[in-house]
Amino acid sequence: MKYFKIKIFIVMSVIAVLSGLSFSRDVSFSNEVVIARPVAEVYAFLADFENMPKWNYYLRSVKRISAGPLAVGTAFHQVRKSDEQDYKITELDSNSIAVETLPPYRKLQMRFEFHQERASTRVVDTWLIRVPFFLSPFIKHNVRNGVAANLEKLKVLLENGQVVLQDGRMEKL
């Protein structure tokens, strides 16, 4: 029975490809973290995307690849553990920053929202990522948990001035 289901899946997949159906699905999720720092400080740190490897263990480096002041359209190149991507800022105002990957990379939109809570900042990090439909439940769960863990590292870094990332790297402000 197991092999029959695999054969059916393969046949359906071939039919879908030949008929032009998409095998992708957009998956979205949000995570939140409250950081005991003022909004302006948290915003400034996150708006400088070259800071991302200091709190996101999956990133090796982020470099700005466009000239001029930070604005909508500013582009970056990031090197991750297993690949590289280019992305640009699509939204930049006092309460939010959003980026989106550039073609030919898989669609990824990431948006940070900043909310003042007394002397702290609540950061809402919302992702939309296009993934193969059959992997979407697994990817959503794993990526969401990974993003949440990274946000906790961001909190520790901004509140304490240093953090040990999941891969053992020590990062400092």
Image: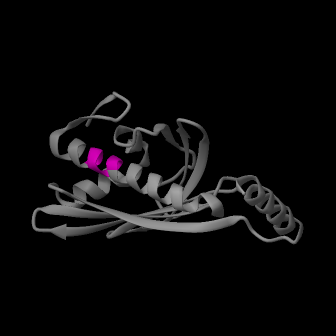
On screen, residue 173 above or below 111:
above
Q: Which residues are magenta?
A: 149-154
Question: In this view, which residue lies farthest toward the front?
Answer: 1
Residue at 33 percent across and 48 percent down: it is 149
Tell me the residue at 64%/61% (across/down): 134
72 to the left or right of 20: left
Residue 4's spot in the image, x, y percent? 77, 58
Quadrant of residue 8 in the image? bottom right
Looking at the rendered image, the quarter that the N terminus falls into is bottom right
The colour style of the image is one colour
Q: Quadrant of the C terminus?
A: top left
Q: Position of residue 11 (x, y in %)?
A: 84, 62
Q: Indicate the quadrant where residue 23 lies.
A: bottom right
Judging depth in this view, the residue of 40 and 160 nearest the camera is 160
Q: Is residue 71 magenta?
A: no
Query: Is residue 132 visible in the rendered structure shown here?
Result: no
Residue closest to the far right? 18
The image position of residue 172, as x and y in percent, is: 26, 33
Question: Is residue 159 found left or right of 81 in the rendered image?
Answer: left
Q: Nearer the viewer, residue 131 or 95?
A: 131
Q: Is residue 162 left or right of residue 1?
A: left
Q: Is residue 129 above or below residue 86?
A: below
SS assignment for the magenta stretch, majority: helix
Residue 83, horizontal then vertical, whole percent: 61, 39
